[in-house]
Image (cartoon, rainbow, N blue to C red):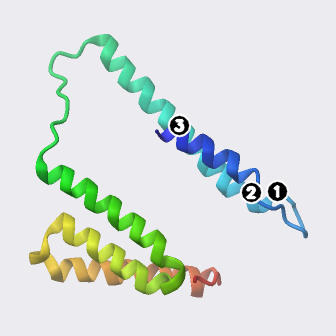
Amino acid sequence: MSVLIGATYTAQAFMLPKAMVGNPWAPLYFPIGLGLLMIALGTLLIVLEVRKAVKGVDDYKRPKFTASSIKLIAGTSAACVTYALIFEDLGFIPSSLLFLGSLLSMINGLKAWKINGVITLGFTFGAWFTFVKIFQINLP
């Protein structure tokens, strides 16, 4: 999946508009690099897994999906889709607070609300400060 997503992402990155001033390829370097990195890491993962299968590792165990792991996968997927849908309307800070808060609650449970809150607030406002104040990139 990583190779397929990386290939699609890289192909789409080449369709981004080029800069009118300066190096026309400058805005494309990061997305293309990210796509190529996804392809490379996906390929490395395939090679490593095939090598394991060829060696016939006896103690290799397939992961077993429990009800809690399936619930976590479904919850994470739902949180990601919700985040993508509300991001533009609510903006970076509210949508990121909701997204991270919900993910950490699913992973750590509601009893860890203090640490979940600290991580959620710290990461959200840390990322906002980094982009807006340091890099001077406006976020939605």
Secondary structure at badge 2 equals helix
User: At 69% from the left edge and 45% from the top edge, which residue is drawn?
Assistant: 11
User: At 36% from the left edge and 25% from the top edge, which residue is drawn?
Assistant: 49
Q: Mark 2 points at which residue?
A: 28
Q: Name the residue under label 1.
A: 25
**Percent position of residue 52, x then y:** 31, 19
Q: How far apart are marks 2 and 1 (CA)?
A: 5 Å
Secondary structure at badge 3 equals helix
Give the label, 1 or 3, closer to the camera. 3
**Percent position of residue 117, x then y:** 24, 82
Mark 2 or mark 3: name the one nearer the start of the chain.
3
Mark 1 or mark 3: name the one nearer the start of the chain.
3
Can you tell which quarter of the image residue 94 is in?
Answer: bottom left
Any mark on residue 129, and which?
none
Looking at the picture, tell me which residue is in the foreground, 124 or 64: 64
Report whether 3 appears left or right of 24.
left
Report whether 3 appears left or right of 116.
right
Can you tell which quarter of the image residue 115 is in?
Answer: bottom left
Could you classify mark 3 by the number of other residues whose Cα lies within 10 Å: few (under 14), some (14-19), or many (20 or more)?
Answer: many
Tag 3: residue type?
A: Val
Q: Are marks 1 and 3 in contact (CB under 8 Å)?
A: no
Secondary structure at badge 1 equals loop
User: At 13% from the left edge and 76% from the top edge, which residue is drawn?
Assistant: 110
Looking at the picture, tell me which residue is in the foreground, 90 or 103: 90
Determine whether 97 is above or below 83 in the image: below
Q: Are marks 2 and 3 in contact (CB under 8 Å)?
A: no
Looking at the rendered image, the quarter that the C terminus falls into is: bottom right
Give the label, 2 or 3, closer to the camera. 3
Q: Do the residues labelled 2 and 1 touch (CB within 8 Å)?
A: yes
